[in-house]
Amino acid sequence: MPLSSEGTHTQRAPSMVDNRNQCKSVFLLAYQSLGFLFGDLTISPLYVYPITFSGRLRHYQNEDTVFGAFSLIFWTLTLISLFKYVILMLSADDNGEGGIIALYSLLCRNAKLCLLPNHQAADEELSTYHNPSYSNRNISSSALKRFIERHKSTKTVLLLLVLLGACMVISVGALTPAISVVSSMEGLKIQAKSTNNSTVVLISCVLLVGLFVLQHRGSHKVAIMFPPIMILWLLSIFIVGIYNIVEWNPRVYQALSPYYIYKFFRITGKDGWISLVGVFLCITGTEAMFADFGYFTATPIRVAFCCVIYPSLVLQYMGQAAYLSKNLTAMPISFYASIPDLLFWPFFVVAVLAAVVSSQAVISATFSIIKQCHALECFPRVKIVHTRRWIHGQIYVPEINWILMILCLAVTVGLQDTNHIGYAYGIAYLTVTIVTTWLTSLVINLVWHQSLIVALVFIILFGSLETIFLSSYCMKIPKGGWAPLLLSAIFLVIMYVWHYGSRKKYLSDLHNKVSMKWILTLGPSLGIVRVPGIALIYTELATGVPATFTHFLTNLPAFYQVVVFVCAKTVPIPHVPHKERYLIGRIGPKSYRMYRCIVRNGYKDVYNNENDLETDLVMSIVELIQLESEGCYGTSDGSVDGRMAVIRTSEKFGTRLLMSESAGIEQSSHNSPSETLRVSSSKSSTLKNLQATYEQESPQLNSRRRIRFELLNTKYRNPRVKDELLEIVEAKHAGVAYVIGHSHIKAKWNSSFIKKFAVNIVYSFLRKNCRSPAVSLNIPQICLIEVGLNYHV
């Protein structure tokens, strides 16, 4: 028995350690999430009650009305924030990522909803493409799925719905800093009686400018302070809430009953319905919890919300209600008025810090949604900076940062009043919430494979509640609610026109591509002079020969000895594992030295170093050649367009090719001649001197890593394999050129006025003023060859 007991204890010990480590990880992530996800939600007590009682409701200031308002706040927070988002929505993740784009990507993977026809069967073989927890490809498609797939107009409406939600998220990025900072600064009016609204707006603008100016340095240096600041803020509002309940009106707990909601509307009528614009603001920020929870995962967020956020907010709103029930004249400044005088200045400082933290989180979320829309060809090319390599997903978009700053200052100075900013803020967030509800209902039916009735129940339950709030906001459109509608309309036009133009350009490329059989008729030399080097021909096509290549050969009958058609595409998943990123295949017979590479990225992946792409491509092609020689990957020498395969660099073959970082263009090998094959550049001394001059004048080239490959002098079963590997290495040393098509699209002469305006004016303007593909890919000008093409669509 003792032995058995000891054996059982020994078996249980590892599991107990694992459980303890898992609990530590959950609580650590829950602690970190307090500083990055909940700032916007927890800052709401600053302005919920003042905005709720800002209209005609101030004529009904009595205890029952205050209790009714708190009851509405409590049940709104419970039904939408707790039940809808924390319990349900955190389960609707896309491989751990949330948000509107994640929901749309889930739908695109489970139904043919994407308007850009670049899907490949090989994409479905990605390890993260299908979620085993609710993916079952054997289930017959629903009637709704078949209806959407058959009608292009339905797909367009769905895309517009997604883009509308994304545009409202951008609007929130401009409105959140404004309302957070201004409402936190309004506390000055209590202690400094001479402070007027203009002074508050001026101080707020200075603080907002500083916030946006510091964005380019990244938030990583101060991010460690975000959780402690928010914990201090939550602890403060929790304690003050309890103090106000005990001090002013302990009976306020009775307002938890929905009966007070009935009494509220019976007393106030239509005026109470209009006041819902302020009540809804108690849940603003909940959407951010779902959109940005990828790093923290669902369980820590649920722990943080249920154990810290929810009780702190409920007690704070309850405490304010208790205070207001005995101090009805303090409605316009209810939060700061309810704080004891001795604690005012510490509370003021913490409130301002919390407002800055919440603003920072929303700005980062705006950068993220721009990146995702750009990846799906729904936003013009902008500069995307990965602020720190070791912090995945931390990005900075300079153009958007300055646009947000201008919009934020315009809203702050133009509307000035917190109430009007709150109306605009509420409409933007409510629209995002409604879009999320509709997309989730589609996920329930198309992805989770639940019946249409279950999806309808979800819409009726939460959609009807959100529609009631939307009806009250319609009354506030003239009083500031127009701002997010105007901003979203502008961004929606930009995003849809860019997507429409990109789609037409892709279809034109597809229509003008050349069959691979035409290449075969030219022979191994392609009927031209082959010069040393590697040409990376960028194209959006995954098959065939792009018009860029044939147009180049027609006008200049000379090309590089190694040709690689590179198709960079976005797959509707958040992240593509690096080992599965490249699809490599051979084009034509081996003597042609032509290959195809499809580079697959997720909509949240960030790659800034194009030099890594050069290295990975060479290593992948070498791996492909060696796999063919060993019979692991069969390709007929007479194949037209070889099948594609995911190539992973293995230790078995990788040892034949050495890779080292060199300080110059030409550097002798440190290995003995007997170990490696001597590879010399075929460039003339004039070209070498010219290239060296260009590199000295170009800081961009000096900052690029120079990778040198050396082929080991080992025995090969097939001498042709050795020759091909040696030719690849020689071509890499001769240089890599990037060939990119510079396409101009124009609407046909018989097109409608709207199409001509969208393509010839709007899309043309966006294309000329956004970053070029070469700049986005970080390609040095000395390595770039652009081929102009004109299309009429």
Image (spheres, grey):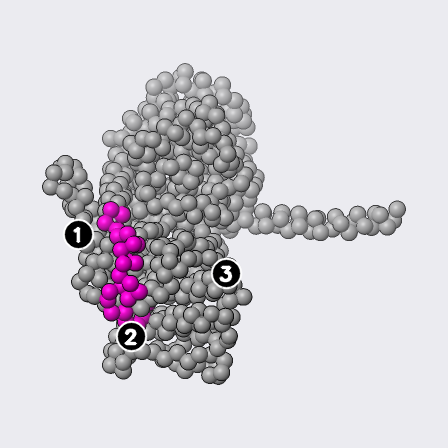
Q: Quadrant of residue 693?
A: bottom left
Whether tag 2 and tag 3 are in contact, CB under 8 A, the answer is no
Q: Which residue is mark 3?
A: 631
**Residue 580 in the image: x percent, y percent?**
46, 54
Q: Residue furthest right?
A: 1
Mark 2 against mark 1, which lies toward the viewer?
1
Q: Residue at x 76, y 49 (%)?
A: 11
The kind of residue tagged 1 is Asn
Q: Which mark is residue 111?
A: none
Q: Residue at x 50, y 24 (%)?
A: 255
* Apparent side of residue 662 relative to residue 500 in the rendered image (left or right): right
Callout 2 secondary element? helix
Of labels 2 and 1, earlier in sequence is 2
Q: Which residue is mark 2?
A: 695
The kind of residue tagged 3 is Gly
Residue 80's place in the image compared with 98, above or below, is above
Screen quadrant of the C terminus? top left
User: Is residue 532 rendered magenta in the image?
Assistant: yes
